[in-house]
Amino acid sequence: MKPDVAIIGPGRVGQTLGRLLFQAGYPVVAVSGLREESARAAVAFIGSGQVLPAIPAAESAELILVTTPDRAIPYVEAALVYSRLRPGAVVAHTSGLLSSRVLEYVRNGPGHPAIASAHPLQSFARPEEAVERLAGVTWALEGDERALAVLEQVVLDLGGRPVRISTDGKPLYHAAASVASNFLVALLGAAVRLGESAGLPREEVVPALLPLVQGTLANVARLGPVEALTGPIARGDVSTVAAHLGAIRASLPDLEPLYLAMGRETLSVARRKASFPHEAAPELERLLGRG
């Protein structure tokens, strides 16, 4: 029998998970938020539950999901410490950065619930779109064994891939996600600036680059980062790298540190390719600096 669920935090993540859980047969019995109108909107989107303050919401469920921003989790914890949770309850938050340790006081409170963190490795721009994109997503789980057993089944029921990580590894896990998602956007922003400076019409730069980016991602998925790497550094083309740097210094000098930093990391990956001409490495190191 699937546990009753309470959602504390009626934002994008709470709405998305609430609807998907309800669709998967989990009774979503309560939603709690600082603003009643936000909680009511979440209940309407989810299709189930009643609006309650945090403590009654938590006391009404067996699985309590804290889907607030990170800065609000300690306040939720402070409230739940005084709640009388059901025997066998599980309390989990969905932060990508914070570990289950932020819920330790809850675990030591009445009922001694099991605690965990469960982070879906996906962006949640709009709940209407996120509910369509969560299937197949990896979830990073850590915490108490009893909580992990429950959450692994939840993730499987939502069509996800549960992966256990270490509690101490959460910051590095979150850094990996930020590099893959946020930094990719920043890199594409730099690429757009370079394209515009080269004379490409502004409205054409992104459409021109996207097929290249999508093809690269497909190659990474198929081959892994090392074998997917192509380009001048991977083939030891010193003159092309020098030409890039000369053009960037002349037109967009503020992007030179980015090119150098990414060039050094690219060289680090390229050295692991069987096809890399290692005799070119010293000159590439000279051009790119050693960091």
Image (spheres, rainbow, N blue to C red):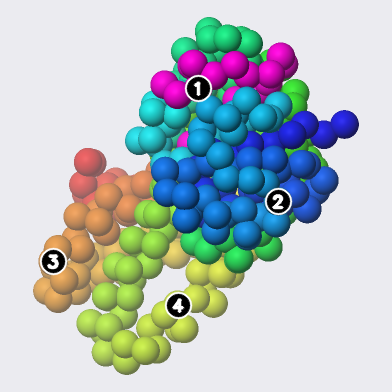
Q: Name the amino acid type tagged 1.
A: Leu
Label 3, label 1: how far apart the Cα atoms are: 52 Å
Give residue 80's mark: 1
- Side of 42 relative to 48 (left or right): left
- Side of 262 relative to 143 (left or right): left
Task: Give the structural element (helix, strand or loop) at label 4.
Answer: helix
Pointer 3 residue: 253
Pointer 4 residue: 209
Q: Earlier in the sequence, mark 4 or mark 1?
A: 1
Q: Position of residue 11 (x, y in %)?
A: 49, 51
Q: Is residue 57 visible?
A: yes
Q: Name the amino acid type tagged 3.
A: Pro
Pointer 2 residue: 48
Eye-nearest disc, 4 or 1? 1
**Main SS, magenta residues:** loop
| 86 inside magenta stretch | yes
| Marks 1,2: beta carbons within 8 A | no
Where, quadrant-wise, is the N terminus in this rendering?
A: top right
170 or 197: which is nearer to us?
Answer: 170
The residue at 27%/59% (across/down) is 259
Eye-nearest disc, 3 or 2? 2
Q: Earlier in the sequence, mark 3 or mark 2?
A: 2
The residue at 78%/53% (across/down) is 23
